Image (tube, helix red, strand yellow):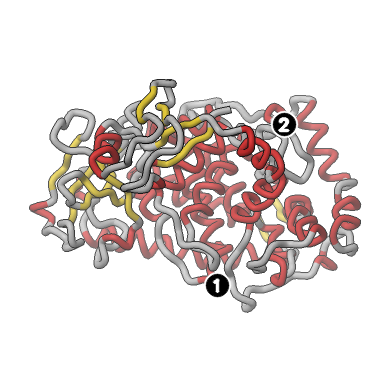
Amino acid sequence: MMKSIDINDLQIGHKTKTDLYAESGDLLISEGVIISGKIVSILNRRNIFTLYYQPTQQEELDELINQNKRLEELSLDIEKSDANRSEPFFPPQSVVLSREFGRKGFDELMQSKSARLLDSDFKKGMIADRPFGKPLERKAKAPEMADRTQSYKNEQVAEYHRALAQTRSILNTVANTERLDGQEIKRVVQRFVNLYKNDYTVLYNLATIKQKNDDYLYSHSLNTCLIAISIAAAAGYSEQQVTEAGMGALLHDIGMLHIHPDIRNKNARLTVDEWYEVQKHPIIGLHLLEKVKNLPRSVPFVAYQCHERENAKGYPKHRRGRMIHRFAKIVQIADVFTAYSSPRSYRPARTPYQSMAFSIKLMRQGFISGELLRSFLQQASLFPLGSIVELDNMCLAKVIKSNESSFGKPVVKVIADRDGNIFSPVHMKVIDLKDDNEHRIARAHGPEAVEHADVLTGL
């Protein structure tokens, strides 16, 4: 099997140790060629961001030996919260669950009657998860940039922070098994569904808002919700279905509040029993959601299955693609994308482009749905909406619109010079890279590249 390498990992001035190919199989760089800045620039201009090579037998052996280790690290990267110890911890005495630690407790949880009933209902086809009704995407629009006044932008950011506070309250209430009506959860999600209809590009930008460490679990849940709304809509789901998928996304990690902070926040490698503790949280979440009134039947599937994988290498039950609810598959993608874009104590945040590239890599390895990721790409592009990119003239631009199947050539708005100095609105130029032959994206940046910009600058 061919292995991939990101062009950003090519070392200028070093010789290639093997032939490097395009995805199509065409030879691009021969073994022994010295990598130069010009070569990297040409690859960028041709929108080639990943190269492929044939691994040696030793590399293939190392790959096989390290497979389990990598899968565990991947799961930990997606799951681990950097929240500090001030976050509430709700011991599992408040729900009917195992009190055993590690593998023994996990095996006991696997006998959950609630989980078996969900499995049975889904297997019998009693839970519909395919699109029906009028697709929400047809209702979506984006206003003229002149209509997005600064007052309007400020209100959207303020609304995000209000929703974040409500998310914290909702998750803590559910985790503590206090009484809660699902309509309260729906109202939070419905606001952003309405925003999607009126200004769909704003959701991607809001999902890049940085939070303090003690807000991580809550901001991750809200940002996953925003991205899941966008993916579900792009995949052709109706407004009702998109709302339900968003509710599932908001609650998808609720069980993590019952995993002890010493394990959730551990930066060292987890022990076997600690890893089993982490794998408990989907079933814990399923039990917690049983206490919420008026919750759509599809929502518990998300908490229960969003850490399963298409190739059966997820958890808790190693379900394969056809036995995973599609709303859970949507949230899988949103969860991975959002987590990879967030900083951790053991690594910095990745750029939105890197997060999308990582998602594509997972899709190629069989972890997540290619169909749903394609819908995400068509709406968000390879450089997702809201991304900061550097053009080949070294100016900085914000991605403001995708170009459907031309994933690497979105519409951008030039917002700053090479030093990050923001242009006045009248000097911000819109460029459609699909039709423009003079400009190309040279590299992707994080939001910090434009120091004094807010998340909605350029819209």
The x and y percentages for residue 171 are 63, 62
The x and y percentages for residue 258 are 74, 64
Crowd class of label 1 (few under 14; some 14 to 19; many from 20; radius 10 Å): some
Q: Nearer the viewer, residue 245 or 69?
A: 69
Q: Nearer the viewer, residue 108 or 194?
A: 108
- Lateral position of residue 5 relative to residue 152, left or right: right
Crowd class of label 2 (few under 14; some 14 to 19; many from 20; radius 10 Å): some
Q: Nearer the viewer, residue 337 or 168?
A: 337
Identify the disc placed on residue 214: 1
Q: Which residue is mark 2?
A: 320
State how many labels appear: 2
- Lateral position of residue 278 relative to residue 54, left or right: right
Identify the disc placed on residue 271: none
Spot the residue most to the bottom.
Answer: 86
- Lateral position of residue 44 relative to residue 65, left or right: left
State yes or no: discs 2 and 1 in contact (Cβ < 8 Å).
Answer: no
Q: Residue at x 59, y 43 (%)?
A: 332
Among numbered discs 2 and 1, the one appearing first in the sequence? 1
The amino acid at mark 1 is Asp
The Cα atoms of the two marked residues, 2 and 1, are separated by 34 Å
Q: Nearer the viewer, residue 44 or 316?
A: 44
The amino acid at mark 2 is Arg
Report if residue 3 is visible in the image.
Answer: yes
Q: Residue at x 18, y 28 (%)?
A: 435
Residue 42, image quadrant? top left
- Lateral position of residue 132 relative to residue 406, left or right: right
Q: Residue at x 68, y 60 (%)?
A: 180
The x and y percentages for residue 412 are 23, 43
Could you say whether the residue bearing mark 1 is in a helix, strand or loop? helix
Could you say whether the residue bearing mark 2 is in a helix, strand or loop? loop
